[in-house]
Image: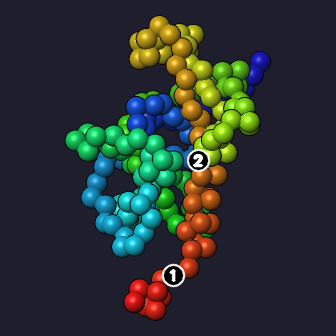
Protein backbone atom coordinates (compact mmCIF):
# COMPACT_ATOMS: atom_id res chain seq x y z
CA UNK A 1 0.00 0.00 0.00
CA UNK A 2 1.37 3.40 -0.94
CA UNK A 3 1.33 6.34 1.41
CA UNK A 4 -1.04 9.30 1.10
CA UNK A 5 0.12 12.83 0.41
CA UNK A 6 -1.88 15.96 1.25
CA UNK A 7 -1.74 18.77 -1.32
CA UNK A 8 -3.38 22.09 -2.14
CA UNK A 9 -4.63 22.24 -5.73
CA UNK A 10 -4.60 25.70 -7.34
CA UNK A 11 -4.81 27.30 -10.75
CA UNK A 12 -2.32 29.47 -12.64
CA UNK A 13 -2.93 30.59 -16.22
CA UNK A 14 -5.71 28.08 -16.75
CA UNK A 15 -3.61 25.08 -15.66
CA UNK A 16 -3.75 23.07 -12.44
CA UNK A 17 -0.84 23.03 -10.00
CA UNK A 18 -0.31 21.70 -6.49
CA UNK A 19 1.88 22.36 -3.49
CA UNK A 20 2.48 20.41 -0.29
CA UNK A 21 -0.17 21.27 2.27
CA UNK A 22 2.44 21.70 5.01
CA UNK A 23 3.75 24.75 3.08
CA UNK A 24 0.38 26.55 3.07
CA UNK A 25 -0.24 28.43 6.29
CA UNK A 26 -3.31 30.37 5.22
CA UNK A 27 -5.33 31.28 2.13
CA UNK A 28 -6.63 34.87 1.95
CA UNK A 29 -8.54 37.00 -0.54
CA UNK A 30 -6.53 39.49 -2.57
CA UNK A 31 -5.84 42.70 -0.67
CA UNK A 32 -4.00 45.92 -1.47
CA UNK A 33 -0.29 45.27 -2.01
CA UNK A 34 2.30 47.99 -1.44
CA UNK A 35 4.77 47.89 -4.33
CA UNK A 36 8.50 47.86 -3.60
CA UNK A 37 10.43 50.27 -5.85
CA UNK A 38 13.02 48.72 -8.20
CA UNK A 39 12.10 45.17 -7.26
CA UNK A 40 11.97 42.27 -9.70
CA UNK A 41 8.77 42.12 -11.78
CA UNK A 42 7.62 38.92 -10.04
CA UNK A 43 7.71 40.61 -6.62
CA UNK A 44 4.34 42.28 -6.31
CA UNK A 45 5.21 44.02 -3.05
CA UNK A 46 4.35 43.63 0.62
CA UNK A 47 1.20 43.36 2.71
CA UNK A 48 0.49 43.94 6.37
CA UNK A 49 -1.75 41.12 7.54
CA UNK A 50 -2.64 41.36 11.22
CA UNK A 51 0.60 43.21 11.98
CA UNK A 52 2.83 40.80 10.06
CA UNK A 53 4.72 42.13 7.02
CA UNK A 54 4.76 39.55 4.22
CA UNK A 55 6.52 39.65 0.85
CA UNK A 56 4.13 38.83 -2.00
CA UNK A 57 5.39 36.96 -5.06
CA UNK A 58 3.40 36.64 -8.27
CA UNK A 59 3.97 32.95 -8.94
CA UNK A 60 2.82 33.15 -12.58
CA UNK A 61 5.39 35.86 -13.34
CA UNK A 62 8.11 34.03 -11.43
CA UNK A 63 7.50 30.83 -13.39
CA UNK A 64 6.94 32.77 -16.66
CA UNK A 65 3.40 31.47 -17.04
CA UNK A 66 0.43 33.31 -18.57
CA UNK A 67 -1.39 35.51 -16.10
CA UNK A 68 -5.12 35.60 -15.45
CA UNK A 69 -7.29 38.51 -16.59
CA UNK A 70 -7.10 41.51 -14.28
CA UNK A 71 -10.91 41.54 -13.87
CA UNK A 72 -10.85 38.29 -11.92
CA UNK A 73 -9.75 38.26 -8.30
CA UNK A 74 -6.65 36.36 -7.35
CA UNK A 75 -5.89 34.59 -4.08
CA UNK A 76 -2.86 34.89 -1.82
CA UNK A 77 -1.47 31.70 -0.29
CA UNK A 78 0.59 32.58 2.77
CA UNK A 79 3.36 30.06 3.16
CA UNK A 80 4.94 28.50 6.22
CA UNK A 81 8.28 29.22 4.62
CA UNK A 82 10.12 31.73 6.76
CA UNK A 83 13.19 31.83 4.54
CA UNK A 84 15.92 33.72 6.31
CA UNK A 85 13.52 35.99 8.14
CA UNK A 86 11.29 36.78 5.14
CA UNK A 87 7.63 35.82 5.33
CA UNK A 88 6.37 34.96 1.85
CA UNK A 89 2.96 34.77 0.20
CA UNK A 90 2.26 33.74 -3.37
CA UNK A 91 -0.42 35.01 -5.73
CA UNK A 92 -2.38 32.30 -7.55
CA UNK A 93 -5.45 32.58 -9.78
CA UNK A 94 -7.65 30.43 -7.54
CA UNK A 95 -7.46 27.62 -5.01
CA UNK A 96 -9.57 24.60 -6.00
CA UNK A 97 -9.23 22.14 -3.15
CA UNK A 98 -7.20 20.41 -0.53
CA UNK A 99 -6.93 16.75 -1.38
CA UNK A 100 -5.15 13.57 -0.52
CA UNK A 101 -3.36 11.68 -3.28
CA UNK A 102 -1.58 8.36 -3.40
CA UNK A 103 2.09 8.05 -4.36
CA UNK A 104 0.86 5.73 -7.12
CA UNK A 105 -0.92 8.71 -8.73
CA UNK A 106 2.34 10.67 -9.09
CA UNK A 107 4.49 10.29 -12.17
CA UNK A 108 8.03 11.64 -12.16
CA UNK A 109 9.09 14.02 -14.92
CA UNK A 110 11.67 12.91 -17.44
CA UNK A 111 14.88 14.81 -16.59
CA UNK A 112 15.76 15.03 -20.29
CA UNK A 113 12.89 17.42 -21.00
CA UNK A 114 14.14 20.87 -21.97
CA UNK A 115 12.45 23.10 -19.43
CA UNK A 116 13.74 25.21 -16.58
CA UNK A 117 10.51 24.40 -14.78
CA UNK A 118 11.47 20.73 -14.46
CA UNK A 119 13.88 21.49 -11.62
CA UNK A 120 10.94 22.87 -9.64
CA UNK A 121 8.46 20.06 -10.35
CA UNK A 122 8.10 17.15 -7.93
CA UNK A 123 5.93 15.22 -10.36
CA UNK A 124 2.71 15.07 -12.32
CA UNK A 125 -0.39 14.03 -10.38
CA UNK A 126 -2.96 11.99 -12.31
CA UNK A 127 -6.47 12.59 -11.00
CA UNK A 128 -9.28 10.33 -12.16
CA UNK A 129 -12.80 9.29 -11.23
CA UNK A 130 -11.51 6.90 -8.56
CA UNK A 131 -10.32 9.92 -6.57
CA UNK A 132 -13.90 11.25 -6.46
CA UNK A 133 -13.28 14.35 -8.55
CA UNK A 134 -15.37 13.42 -11.59
CA UNK A 135 -17.88 16.23 -11.00
CA UNK A 136 -15.17 18.87 -10.87
CA UNK A 137 -12.97 17.60 -13.68
CA UNK A 138 -15.38 15.66 -15.90
CA UNK A 139 -15.22 11.93 -16.55
CA UNK A 140 -11.64 12.03 -17.75
CA UNK A 141 -8.33 12.15 -15.98
CA UNK A 142 -6.78 15.50 -15.13
CA UNK A 143 -3.12 16.28 -14.74
CA UNK A 144 -1.84 18.48 -11.94
CA UNK A 145 1.73 19.78 -11.90
CA UNK A 146 3.09 19.29 -8.38
CA UNK A 147 5.50 22.16 -7.69
CA UNK A 148 8.42 21.97 -5.29
CA UNK A 149 7.45 25.32 -3.75
CA UNK A 150 10.00 25.06 -0.94
CA UNK A 151 12.82 24.84 -3.50
CA UNK A 152 11.35 27.66 -5.60
CA UNK A 153 11.07 30.00 -2.60
CA UNK A 154 14.48 29.05 -1.16
CA UNK A 155 16.18 29.85 -4.48
CA UNK A 156 14.16 33.06 -4.78
CA UNK A 157 15.33 34.25 -1.35
CA UNK A 158 18.95 33.30 -2.12
CA UNK A 159 18.74 35.15 -5.45
CA UNK A 160 17.18 38.23 -3.84
CA UNK A 161 19.69 38.31 -0.96
CA UNK A 162 22.67 37.90 -3.30
CA UNK A 163 21.74 40.80 -5.56
CA UNK A 164 23.76 43.86 -4.62
CA UNK A 165 22.01 47.10 -3.67
CA UNK A 166 22.08 49.86 -6.26
CA UNK A 167 24.47 52.70 -5.45
CA UNK A 168 24.00 56.33 -6.44
CA UNK A 169 26.96 56.05 -8.84
CA UNK A 170 25.09 53.35 -10.78
CA UNK A 171 21.99 55.51 -11.12
CA UNK A 172 23.79 58.57 -12.54
Q: Nearer the viewer, residue 147 or 109?
A: 109
Where residue 146 sits: x, y (%)? 59, 35
Label 2 packing within 10 angstroms: few (<14), some (14-19), many (20+):
many
| Left or right position of 153 against 11 | right
Image position of 100 (left or right of 106): left
Residue placed under numbered mark 2 in the picture: 149
Q: Secondary structure at mark 2?
A: helix
Name the quadrant of the C terminus: bottom left
Which of the two discs, 1 and 2, labels the residue nearer the N terminus?
A: 2
In the displayed orientation, state which residue is furthest to the right: 1
Q: Is residue 18 left or right of residue 33?
A: right
Residue at left offset 37%, top offset 43%: 67
Can residue 114 be seen from the camera position used here? Answer: yes
Tell me where residue 134 appears, x and y as whole percent.
46, 11
Which residue appears farthest toward the left when viewing the image?
Answer: 71
Q: Badge 1: how crowded within 10 Å, few (<14), some, or many (20+)?
A: few
Please tell me whether mark 1 sits on a helix, a strand or a loop.
Answer: loop
Residue located 37% across and 70% down the image: 36
User: Residue 165, which numbered label?
Assistant: 1
Is residue 120 in view? no
Give the vertical position of 101 relative to 68 (above or below): above
Which percent across, then down, holds residue 31?
A: 28, 54
Q: Foreground: 163 or 47?
A: 163
Quarter of the view holding residue 2: top right
- Quadrant location of residue 138? top left
137 lies above or below 88: above
For marks 1 and 2, give the CA distance.
Answer: 26 Å
Q: Quadrant of the N terminus?
A: top right
| Label disc, if present, on residue 140 of the rendered structure | none
21 lies above or below 140: below
Amino acid sequence: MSSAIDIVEFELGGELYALDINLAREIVEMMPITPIPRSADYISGIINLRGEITNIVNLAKLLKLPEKDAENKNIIVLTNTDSRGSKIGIIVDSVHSVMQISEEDVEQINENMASDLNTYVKGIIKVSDKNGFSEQHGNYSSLIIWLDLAKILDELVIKTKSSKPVTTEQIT
